[in-house]
């Protein structure tokens, strides 16, 4: 009896250890590639190409000093940041106001309007129809292309509506008794109470904006509208030309910098510049992501 | 800017103030509804170009009406369409076969007694979900290209990798792309199961313990049955999305060495439309894809209704 119990706990221990090992391994697989790219980008190019695994070799930030002198890249970073900020603000404001409208019982055709929005989650016209339509609206090579189409998102609308519906009605009612109209109630009562869900939607929207590039690729060939994602895509496919232009640019100012610039580490550094904003904010905002998926699951 | 009953100012006849308010709300919602219509419904009108020989710049009256000719192209082009469908279905099926993995990962995370380790693991494993496929491509290039980390490590241990690198290996492309998809989404997809697990009544575990169940047995008999309903819902949704692998991933990982097996339906719609510039035929393909997906969604919705008395959407 005693023996059997002991064996059992031994096998449980083994299973437990195996569990830690496997989870640890997958965590490592999700972490190490980014770590590798970061240490590569801050290593001396020649030493890095001989192989680095755990620590940077010949630590240097030369590459970043050069990369941040690239007008293209700085501009793309600005465009990406702009579309993220403007797109997110617009999306959160529109989605929440629309959601609040849609829970007003007095509203005419309320159900019809709501259904029309929800259907868009499942109905996709396709690439070419989207392309033709955007062109027809004159959104080709237009910054509005980045922020208008995503302004109202059915999924965010569901999240917002579900959340507002469960807010205590008494607060709104007392505001109404004080003579508050729709907008006063919305801005003074509903929005302050909905901070958690607003944060969730904002985080989703911001990540989506930061990561999106299809609109840029298909409809904004204008260099002035190039996003960071697309510039990374270009670098990944044609980094030679870029490294050369950077070499030429830096050779004028600093002859020693030349050795540390090659297509490989230029790509690495660009990946870092593209990912770091997300990596920096992500751990702090994780709870909002989780909240979104859970609220969505309740409804979906 | 307040919306208030406007009967005082306008002559709405015998309309009640409440009705007027309802009309005003509706009028205001039109601002938002217009955006939805402009960006989600108007593009649908372009489906009508499927019956024409679409030329950019021409008005619909100036184009040749071709009837069903563009639909017949699907049959003429069947060899290519079949190849693309094969790729689409193979990768979707690999995805469906691997669909229990997030549930398994959630159970594994839940079994970790060290809370700090669990939190760190959860945070790190959800991160890949929030990077773009372009970045994933960059990361894969750093890892797997012929000058990348993995081949050099494999060589260090005396092994060998495909000479083209795995990114250029037609033989591995299905598995490799599926593995990337899992890498990217596993941690994120586990969250919903973690929530389901945390909702399980603790009494069930206590009861199982009294009955002499060890940890593995209580997982099998308490945890697993509790998350099966969630799993079924997600499985049905995955089935309805069988034709929608997405575009980004296959676009960024496309190269001529793997083109035979990486071209999925979403990619093919792009290839025909943008690269070949046959807009009308591309629209036909996109239409089929959308309509079949909606049909599948209705089907799984009905299945779900009969199975669990609850619809999905």
Image (cartoon, coloured by chain):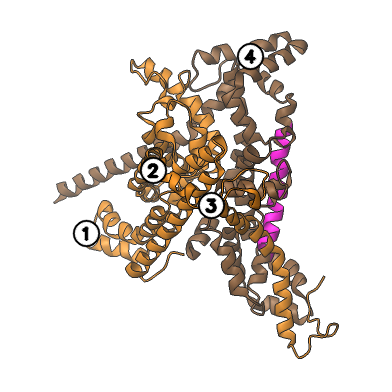
Colour of chain A in the rendered structure image = brown
- Residue A98 screen position, x and y as percent: 67, 65
How much space separates mark 4 and mark 2, taking CA atoms? 46 Å
Residue corresponding to mark 1:
B212
Chain letter behind tag 4: A
Q: Marks 4 and 3, how far apart in space?
A: 57 Å
Marks 3, 2: nearer the viewer: 3
Magenta part of the protein: which range?
A75-97
Measure how far apart labels 3 and 2 are at the Cα level: 23 Å
Task: Find residue B85 and name its label.
Answer: 2
Q: Are marks 3 and 1 in contact (CB under 8 Å)?
A: no
Q: Colour of chain B?
A: orange
Identity of the residue drawn at 33% across and 58% down? B223
How packed mark 3 is, by other alpha carbons closer than 10 Å (few <14, some 14-19, many 20 or more), is: many
Tell me where residue B290 appears, x and y as whole percent: 48, 54
Q: Nearer the viewer, mark 3 or mark 1?
A: 3
Chain identity of mark 3: B
- 10 Å neighbourhood of mark 1: few (<14), some, or many (≥20)? few
The answer to whether marks 3 and 1 sit on the same chain is yes
Describe the element under mark 2 as helix, strand or loop.
helix
Q: Position of residue B151 (x, y in %)?
A: 41, 20
**Same subunit under labels 1 and 4?**
no
Q: Nearer the viewer, residue A16 or B106?
A: B106
Would residue B237 be found to the left or right of residue A112 on screen? left
Residue at (62, 46) in percent of width and height? A131
């Amino acid at each position: 009896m005693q023996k059997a119990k002991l064996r059992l706990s031994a096998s449980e221990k083994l299973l437990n250890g195996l569990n830690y090992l496997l989870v640890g391994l997958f965590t490592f697989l999700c972490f190490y590639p980014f770590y590798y790219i970061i240490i590569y980008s801050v290593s001396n190019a020649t030493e890095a190409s001989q192989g680095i695994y755990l620590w940077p070799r010949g630590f240097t930030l030369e590459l970043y000093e050069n990369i941040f002198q690239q007008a293209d890249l700085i501009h793309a970073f600005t465009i990406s940041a702009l579309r993220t900020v403007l797109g997110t603000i617009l999306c959160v404001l529109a989605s929440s106001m629309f959601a609040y409208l849609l829970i007003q019982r007095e509203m005419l055709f309320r159900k019809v309007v709501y259904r029309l929005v929800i259907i868009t989650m499942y109905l996709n016209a396709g690439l070419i129809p989207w392309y033709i339509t955007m062109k027809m609206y004159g959104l080709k090579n237009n910054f509005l292309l980045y922020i208008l189409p995503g302004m109202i998102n059915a999924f965010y609308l569901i999240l917002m509506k579900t959340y507002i519906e469960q807010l205590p009605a008494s607060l709104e009612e007392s505001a109404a008794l004080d003579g508050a109209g729709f907008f006063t109630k919305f801005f003074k009562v509903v929005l302050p109470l909905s901070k958690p869900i607003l944060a969730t939607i904002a985080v989703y929207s911001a990540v989506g904006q930061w990561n999106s590039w299809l609109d840029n690729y298909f409809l904004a060939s204008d260099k002035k509208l190039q996003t960071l994602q697309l510039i990374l895509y270009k670098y990944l496919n044609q980094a030679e030309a870029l490294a050369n232009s950077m070499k030429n640019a830096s050779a004028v100012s600093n002859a020693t910098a030349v050795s540390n610039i090659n297509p490989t580490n230029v790509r690495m550094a660009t990946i870092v510049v593209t990912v770091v904003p997300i990596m920096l904010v992500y751990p702090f905002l994780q709870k909002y992501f989780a909240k979104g998926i859970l609220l969505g699951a309740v409804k979906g | 800017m307040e919306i208030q009953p406007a009967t005082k100012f306008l002559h709405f006849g015998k309309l009640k103030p409440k009705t007027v308010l309802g009309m005003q709300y509706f009028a205001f919602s039109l601002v938002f509804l217009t955006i939805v219509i402009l960006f989600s419904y108007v593009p649908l009108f372009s489906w009508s170009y499927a019956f024409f020989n679409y030329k950019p710049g021409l008005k619909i009256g100036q184009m040749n009406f071709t009837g069903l000719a563009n639909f017949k192209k699907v049959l003429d082009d069947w060899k290519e369409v079949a190849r693309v469908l094969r790729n689409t279905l193979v990768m979707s099926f690999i995805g469906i076969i691997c669909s229990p993995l997030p549930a398994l990962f959630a159970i594994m995370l839940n079994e970790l007694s060290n809370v700090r380790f669990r939190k760190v693991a959860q945070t790190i494993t959800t991160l890949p979900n929030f990077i773009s496929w372009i970045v994933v491509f960059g990361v894969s290039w750093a890892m797997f290209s012929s000058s990348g980390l993995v081949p050099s490590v494999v060589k260090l241990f005396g092994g060998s990798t495909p000479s083209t690198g795995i990114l250029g290996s037609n033989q591995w492309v299905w598995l490799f792309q599926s593995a990337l998809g899992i890498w990217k989404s596993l941690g994120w997809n586990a969250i919903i199961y973690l929530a389901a697990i945390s909702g399980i009544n603790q009494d069930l575990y206590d009861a199982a313990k009294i009955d002499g169940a060890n940890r593995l047995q209580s997982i099998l008999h308490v945890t697993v049955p509790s998350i099966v309903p969630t799993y079924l819902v997600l499985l049905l949704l995955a089935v309805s999305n069988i034709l929608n692998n997405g575009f980004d991933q296959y676009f960024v990982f496309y190269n001529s060495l793997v083109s035979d097996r990486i071209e999925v339906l979403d990619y093919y719609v792009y290839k025909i439309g943008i690269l070949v510039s046959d807009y009308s035929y591309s629209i036909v393909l996109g239409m089929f894809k959308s309509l079949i997906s909606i049909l599948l969604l209705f089907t799984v919705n009905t299945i779900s209704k009969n199975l669990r008395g609850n619809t999905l959407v």
